[in-house]
Amino acid sequence: MDDLYRELIIERYKSPQFRGELDPHDISFEDDNPLCGDHIRVDLRLDENDTVTEAAFSGQGCAISQASADLLMESVVGKSLAEVKALTKDDLLDLLGIELGPVRLKCALLSLKVLKAGAYGLGEANDDLVE
Amino acid sequence: MNIQTTALDVAKIREDFPILAREVHPGVPLVYLDSTATSQRPRQVVEAMERLIYHSNANIHRGIHVLAEEATAAYEEARGKIAKFINAPSARQVIYTRNTTESINLVAQSWGRANLKAGDVVILTEMEHHSNLVPWQILAMEKNLRLEFIPVTEDGLLDLDAYRELLTLEPKLVAFTQMSNVLGTINPAKEIIVLAHAAGAVTLVDGAQSVPHLPVDVQALNADFLAFSAHKMLGPTGIGALYGRKELLEAMPPFMGGGDMIKRVELRSFQPNSIPHKFEAGTPAITEAIGFGAAVDYLNQIGMVAVESYEQEIVAYALERLAEIPGVRVFGPEAEQKGAVVSFLLDDLHAHDISQVLDMHGIAVRAGHHCAQPLHDKFGITSTARASFYIYSAFEEVDKLVAGIYKVKEMFA
Ligand SMILES: Cc1ncc(COP(=O)(O)O)c(C=O)c1O
């Protein structure tokens, strides 16, 4: 249980490295977690080969959602857009290194959902993206 | 400090709730502070349901055999208890629904559809649960109604001057919660209803939080509709009730069509049954209705006056203890105007993190917007942590909450 707040999570929550907004950006998307009203926005910059050169997130949320967004942003820099689209729930959980119950899973997955909806250029974020 | 209570014998009450004796993590006992979301159920409720299942289970209103007679009698007897509990003039004015939400949707879809037209004003409040908000938004979109809201003040009270002002719009309906599930505010229901009636409006009281925690008398209130749920008052999930004034219910069209709600059916038409059956289409939650009746018995045996005064004591104690903790911000009014609900935030932490760490210490509170997003928007926050109390909540559990909150501070220090 205590593992939920392992050091990495607390550290990334308190001093995120990828927090902010990118203006201009090539991709930007935002969405809410309907359970708690939390909100996350993700901005990406791409090079001419559609590789992510910069990534940032903004919005508010709990330690799990903020740390997961920060770790996710870190992981996508250098990835191609195709690789970003292919990211899965398990990829994110590996980054976090914790086990989550169904409610907290939604917190953790919000940033991935927003990122993928942006990568796919969807009008709306869909839970299928993080199944 | 010695504010130990005499209103209830909590230790004895706790013996009726086996779940309160469990551990949630090895060696960590449960401290259940989430009764506003749903209460726990005593043995007596479970046993009443078990008796029906093992002894008298049958469908109701439609069999001429012993089991059907017994089940029907038990179902109607429970309705009578519920009616008496809120002092309804007749059991026929109590309609079984699934929950408060369905009760309100019933009023919106049946009474609202038949009685409201484009441009009509409906007054709600800024502290409504989504279940007394979205049904009216749906109807407003369909009918082009005008929704207006009684504002909530900084202290978490309804602004009654603004309400009086809104009444000059000649609303057709005033629908409001008698107790806020976030702020705990106990609204002056009687005064709101008197003013609404004087302006010619029908009134709907969301009693989801008030009926479990205060004596509620629909005749003294002169409420036109009252909606509440069994699961928040020691009963099972899946059953709730709508009380309505007789003339209104009789004039209303049916809500759902099907078996039981009809008097006579032909291929192209039907005649609706009389109330309450007109609104109870299909096989209802029979076992749960019996459980609802047993929950009412249990509360009656304690007495709602005692329930209310005990909760006043425990919430006053909780507010006092929380005020000792640096960085705690409590939302809502002072203890005197508040039910046993305390929503709070700590430092700049997110409510999820507060409640997650509390859970590590066995303390169950709720975190989120508690289905009242507009209210949280009003206070400029997305979510709060909420501790709520009921008849089985002990003062020591408040102490455990306080100790837990210090643990949260430590974790994120
Ligand atoms: C004030 C209020 N109204 C309505 C509801 C909805 O109750 P139910 O979910 O049982 O329909 C709740 C439950 O949280 C509530 O607290």
Image (tube, rainbow, N blue to C red):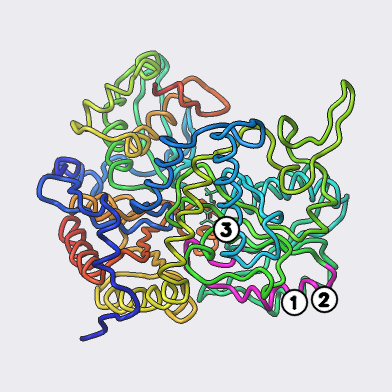
Q: Nearer the viewer, mark 2 or mark 3?
A: 3
Q: Residue furthest bottom?
A: B1
| Location of residue A48 in the rendering, given as x and y in whole percent from the top left corner | 42, 17
Nearer-N-terminus badge (3/1): 3
User: What's the residue type where badge 2 is placed?
Assistant: Ala
Q: Which mark is residue B198?
A: 2
Asked which secondary structure carries label 3, the reply is helix
Marks 2 & 1, CB-CB < 8 Å contact: yes
Asked which secondary structure carries label 2, the reply is helix
Would you name the residue on which mark 3 appears? Answer: B82
Give the distance between the C-alpha atoms of the residues marked 2 and 1, in whole angstroms: 6 Å
Query: Which residue is located at x 35 percent, y 54 percent?
Result: B42
Question: Quick check: A75 left or right of B286?
Answer: left
Q: Quadrant of the C terminus of chain A?
A: top left
Q: Chain of mark 2?
A: B
| Location of residue B237 in the rendering, given as x and y in whole percent from the top left corner | 47, 44
Instruction: Please state the extent of the stretch shown in magenta in the rendering.
Output: B177-200
Q: Chain of mark 1?
A: B
On whether residue B199 falls in the magenta region, the answer is yes
Q: Chain of mark 3?
A: B
Q: Quadrant of the N terminus of chain A?
A: top left
User: What's the residue type where badge 1 is placed?
Assistant: Val
Marks 3 & 1, CB-CB < 8 Å contact: no
Would you name the residue on which mark 1 appears? Answer: B194
Q: Is residue A56 above or below residue A80?
A: below
Give the distance between the C-alpha atoms of the residues marked 2 and 3, in whole angstroms: 29 Å
Q: Is residue A23 above or below residue B410?
A: above
Q: Residue furthest left?
A: B27
Q: Is residue B354 above or below residue B69?
A: below
